[in-house]
Amino acid sequence: MRSYIAILSVGALLSFSAPLAAFAQEQVSPSVTPGLGTQSAAPVGNVFCFDYYRFGSVQADLESNLASTVPGAEIGFAGNLKNDNDYPLVDGTLYVKIFKKDDRTFQAGNGNVVVDQFPLEEAFTLPAKGEKPVSFTWNVPRNLPGGDYYAAFFFATSDRYNILGLSFTDDVIGNQAPFSVVNAEESPVVSFDKNAATLNDTPHTFVAFPPHFKSDETVTAKVKLVNASPDPVIVPVIWKQYSWDALRPENIRNQKTELVEVKGNETKEISYAAISTNDAVTYLVVETKDQEAKTFLDIRFVRDGIQETRINFPSVLKFPLKAGEENALFVCAHSTNEPTVKENLLMLTLRDENQNVIRQFRYDGDISGAMSGWKDSFTPDKTYTKVSLTATLERQGRVFEEVLITYDCDQIDPDLCTESGMMLIGEGDVKSLVVYGIALLTLVALLVIFIAKLKRRKARLGA
């Protein structure tokens, strides 16, 4: 099934949330800070970011092997990851959320209920305009309630850059694979009431822009556990506090685990006070588990007054690099919740496999909340089949983000760098080969003349 996501404008691609029923078609003004609902300055940079970075340009065309299954069974998902870009994508991660359809939460503007979420362990490399097969299995919990479910897919590179869906949302999702669960011996499980979450006693809506708080304000999340059975149940509750999202382990800021007893037919409120950090965006993931059945709540909020900038996506425009053929580096970046952040240094450095610099781009200046793009064109004088791109974002001498992306023909697609068994060569390489060929022919001719003269000399001496 194709993604419902349209190519949204500007920062809506990062954390914009709109009801899934509307298929996320709303357009967001370029003057709005990415997904955070605040006004921002106009884009900076020298190109329009979305001419080169295309949100939704990867499709996860997977289907389940069973239309209907039962608790305790294993269900499989298989298909292909398809890259519609003219450049390859490397170090990709496919992230999965399993949803249970729930009209009550959906109609309240909170989307459906998350019963599992996880990344696949495999790292994916997708050639330009290419695809790769993917498959995995999911063990259906033995006490999972019956109903209609679907797996939703998200794709990101370098555990940072969202290409398909936004894993920190429940509505900006990629492709989906539906299935149903039939449970003939169903009994109630302890789970979260998704319609009852609050932040500082204000109801939290999961399908909406994240709420804003002051930079030094204490933010307390409250959620409710519901036990619809007549018997008391003790369940674990795990709180994880992240910066921005949960794609990288380095983003975690705090973790708290507690055992909670919920009496029969009781709804019990529990809370978590977010620790004070210097993060502009906080992402709280709270999980509970009753026997094998899980539920998750993914809560996101913003702290105003904290200056933060982010790289949205860096890449080469074409790969492999061919001598004499124009290429380019490009990058998109934005501030997270301030209209403009000053004194930034954004650098792209392209190196060959021996760490020699092929090309370097540098931008010093403001970065606004509106998504901005930079492009640096160049023409290599050699053909390169293995290069690395380092993208660095600094402010006032401190490195806030740095990522290394390696492009290797052997890893992406060896056929990219061969043609009928011959190594691809660019225009510049052809010129070099011509020069080398002429030099070699000249050397051979001189050698032939020398040998001929030597033979004539020996013949004269012999006479």
Image: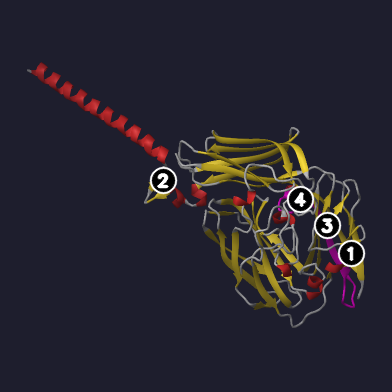
Closer to the chain start, of discs 4 and 1, is 4
Q: Which residue is mark 1?
A: 260
Disc 2 versus disc 4: distance between alpha carbons? 44 Å
Q: CA distance from mark 4 to mark 1?
A: 39 Å
Q: In the structure shown, which secondary structural element does the residue marked by tag 1 occupy?
A: strand
- How would you rate the neighbour count of disc 1 (Cα within 10 Å): few for under 14, some for 14-19, many for 20 or more? some
* Disc 4 + disc 1, Cβ < 8 Å: no
Q: Secondary structure at mark 3?
A: strand
Q: Nearer the viewer, residue 8 or 94?
A: 8
Q: Write the residue at 85% across / 66% down.
A: 235
| Residue 199 seen in this snapshot | yes
Q: Which mark is residue 26?
A: none
Image location of residue 302, percent across then percent down: 82, 51
The residue range painted magenta reads: 225-249
The answer to which of marks 2 and 1 sits earlier in the sequence is 1
Q: Of the two numbered discs 2 and 3 on the same chain, state the one appearing first in sequence.
A: 3
| The image quarter in which residue 347 lies | top right
Left or right: residue 369 compared with residue 215: left
Q: Report which residue position mark 2 lands on.
A: 424
**Nearer the N terminus, badge 2 or badge 4?**
4
As measured in the structure, the alpha-carbon distance from the residue carrying label 3 to the one carrying label 4 is 28 Å
User: Which three-letter amino acid code belongs to the residue tagged 2?
Assistant: Leu
